[in-house]
Amino acid sequence: MSAAPQRVAGVLALLSAALLIGTSALGPSAASPSLGPATALPPYALGVHPSSGVVTVLLVAAYLAGGTAVASGLWAVRHGAVVPRSWIVAAGCVAALAVLVPPLGSADHLSYAAYGRIAVQGGDPYVVPPVSWTGGLDPVTSAVEDPWTRTPSLYGPVATGVQALTSLVGGDSLRRTVWLWQLACLVSWLAVGVLLRRRGGSRGAWLWLLNPVLLGLLLVGAHVDLLAAALGLGALLLVPRRSLLAGVLLGAAVGVKLTFVLFAPAILYALWRNRSGWRPVLLGVAGAALVLVPSYVVAGSHAFDQLGQARRFVSLATPWRLLVDAYGARGLVLLLWPLVAVVLVVLLARALRPRPAGSDVTSDAARAAVVLGAAYVLAAPYSLPWYDAIAWAPLALATTGLDALLLVRLVVLALAYVPGRVAGMSPQVHDLTLGYRREVAPWLGIGLLLWLVVLARRVETPRTGHRASRH
């Protein structure tokens, strides 16, 4: 009974991935910036230069097909379907194809290349904006696009170190530098996929390796969040046995993107719940310090400058934007959102399925990480679809009951940032996509919050009104 839905899901997933990779392979567009002259090395593109309308239609179809594929695949798994090994191999091949074409969906990878270039050439990427480096004549830093041309790096020193390494090897070639970054993303994507498949079975496969929406946002998009997710997941898996190494990986994840510090209280909670004592805590703290202390000493105090600026941003697709647009209440938003995040932590924790018997430190840490990560992305005033990696990486390690909600959130946000760049759009595409991002997506976000309230209420039994057992 479940075989047919899974086959349909597989076809839709393959179609979605083909649309994503194929759109990128068409060449520079409103979704994919130019990487300069073609070379013998990837990424490759045909140079068709499709219109903004064409790429928008292709990407919308890709994300809708991908979301339907994952929903169907998860339904089939719940009804006994098992993902064949051949599908996992095929997913790995698709991932390899994804880094043979230029990144898609934003121009963030140009900023990554620029920050690495500045660091390698002796500058401070936390102080120097890309447009100012060498008078704006550098072949790599000059490629950065608005609105980030005057923005120094806000990423952690570990991310800057990886960016510097890709720049060191890539040299003056923007295309080669970007491709090396894509290879780092590919390694991270496959590492997470293999770990989740091994631990999470067929559900884990559909939540990551067979998930074309995540593939498009994280791997084809070549976002730094993918590196942090891989390191953070490694920390969750290793903490019961190799606490020192788990701390090193967690410190590296935080050193890539600061928001992954949320994995720390998740791990502490799991250790406390499983009565693991103080030794793994102390070893984990020591491991994290081994990475974070020297990396931030090298990066300097300016490594936090842009984080202070970014905390004031309110993205267009979040529910908070309605308040800002109607009343200009940006200061009130900054005051309220942490309180909302706390409320969401409570609701998300209540919405979890009962803790399975025999749960270990990793599964408890993963459940807590999903709760904290989801609360952050749902509550934060500035939230973009690839930020959701913080909740999706641990999702397959935990039986949460939040798969559907997080999938809908992912598709809603993915559609809100199609085609991806702020340049190259026709007036019609600009008005249509901005209208959805600004007028529709925030209300859908409110709908997701109401859905979460409904999920949280299911802990009450329908007959007696008493809370159902959680143990």
Image (tube, rainbow, N blue to C red):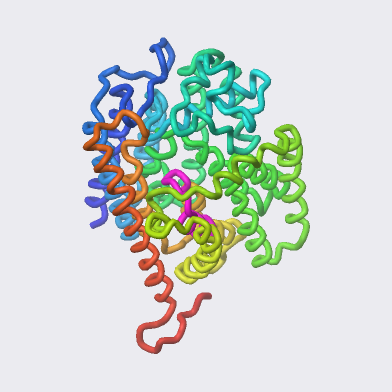
Whether 4 is drawn above or below 306: the answer is below
- Give the quadrant of the N terminus: bottom left
Picture coordinates of residue 308 (x, y %)?
61, 46
Residue occupying image coordinates x 28% and y 38%: 430
| 186 displayed left or right of 420 | right
Q: Which residues are magenta?
A: 372-388
Whether 120 is drawn above or below 298: the answer is above
| 416 displayed left or right of 179 | left
Q: Nearer the viewer, residue 248 or 49?
A: 49
Whether 195 is drawn above or below 320: the answer is above
Q: Nearer the viewer, residue 388 or 211?
A: 388
Residue occupying image coordinates x 74% and y 56%: 281
Picture coordinates of residue 79 (x, y %)?
31, 60
Residue occupying image coordinates x 50% and y 65%: 340
Residue occupying image coordinates x 65% and y 35%: 157
Whether 376 is drawn above or below 428: the answer is below
Picture coordinates of residue 469 (x, y %)?
49, 79
Q: Quadrant of residue 453?
A: bottom left
**Residue 378 part of the magenta segment:** yes
Q: Nearer the viewer, residue 150 or 69?
A: 150
Q: Quadrant of residue 133?
A: top right
